[in-house]
Each structure stands twice: as structure tokens, then as C-alpha cells.
Amino acid sequence: MRRPGTSAKARSKPATTRWRLRLYVADETPACVNSYANLKRLCEEHLRGRYSIEVVDVLENPRLARGDQIVAIPTLVRRSPQPRRVVIGDLSDTDKALVGLRLS
């Protein structure tokens, strides 16, 4: 039941939820470098102090990429909170990235 004065967004993800994100890249290609910068900006704007980012270079650690079924790079995987979410691309379209991560 909805409590007066609370929005659906406020009820869905408490402010204390810790976000674990894994960004898959390949070397330091421009798209991969941009994806990290865009992700860092999004996290600071929307999750300040409540997130961790793990960057995985698929050229150095292909086993992790296989485990997460990565088929394109850059790819962001939201490991927590559940459910797992995947966003492909450099995250330059802020609105699409927020929707993909379920932050909006």
C-alpha cells in the first residue's frame, strides 16, 4: 500500500542501496574511455557514495566476459541491486543509460 507523501521511485530503491557495476572494455579505445567517463559522471550525479565500478578489459580477462555473456563492448552490467541489467554502448545518451540502469 502506498504511504502518503512517498513516490514509487523513493520506495523502489532505498538511498542506502549499494550499486555494483561492472564495465567491460577492450583496451583504451575511444568508445571505452568515453564509456567510463560517462558512467562515472552518471554515478556521481545519481548514486554519489553508493556505487562501485569494476572495469574489466576483455583482452586481459576473457573468462569474466564469457561468464557475463558479453557480446559487444563497451558493455555495462549492473550486478546489484538485482535484477541484473545490461547496457551496451558508451553511455553518452544519458536518458537511455538511466532507463537501462533503471535509475529513472
Image: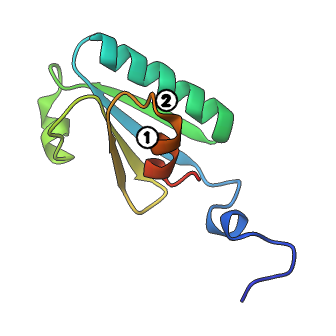
Task: Compare marks 2 and 1 and give the one earlier in the sequence.
Answer: 1
The image position of residue 71, as x and y in percent, is 14, 39
Tell me the residue that label 2 is attached to: 39
Quarter of the image that includes the N terminus: bottom right
Q: Residue sitting at 43 percent across and 49 percent down?
A: 100
Marker disc for residue 36: none
Q: Residue furthest bottom?
A: 1
The image position of residue 29, as x and y in percent, is 27, 11
Q: Amino acid at mark 1?
A: Leu
- Residue 78 versus residue 32 in the image, above or below: below
Which residue is nearer to you in this view: 92 or 33? 92
Colour logic: rainbow
Horizontal side of residue 11 vs 73, given as left or right: right
The image position of residue 54, as x and y in percent, is 40, 31
What crowding class fits label 1: few (fewer than 14 Cα within 10 Å), some (14-19), or many (20 or more)?
A: many
Say if residue 77 shows up in the picture. yes
The image position of residue 42, as x and y in percent, is 57, 33
Tell me the residue that label 1 is attached to: 21
Q: Are marks 2 and 1 in contact (CB under 8 Å)?
A: yes
Q: Residue sitting at 59 percent across and 53 percent down?
A: 104
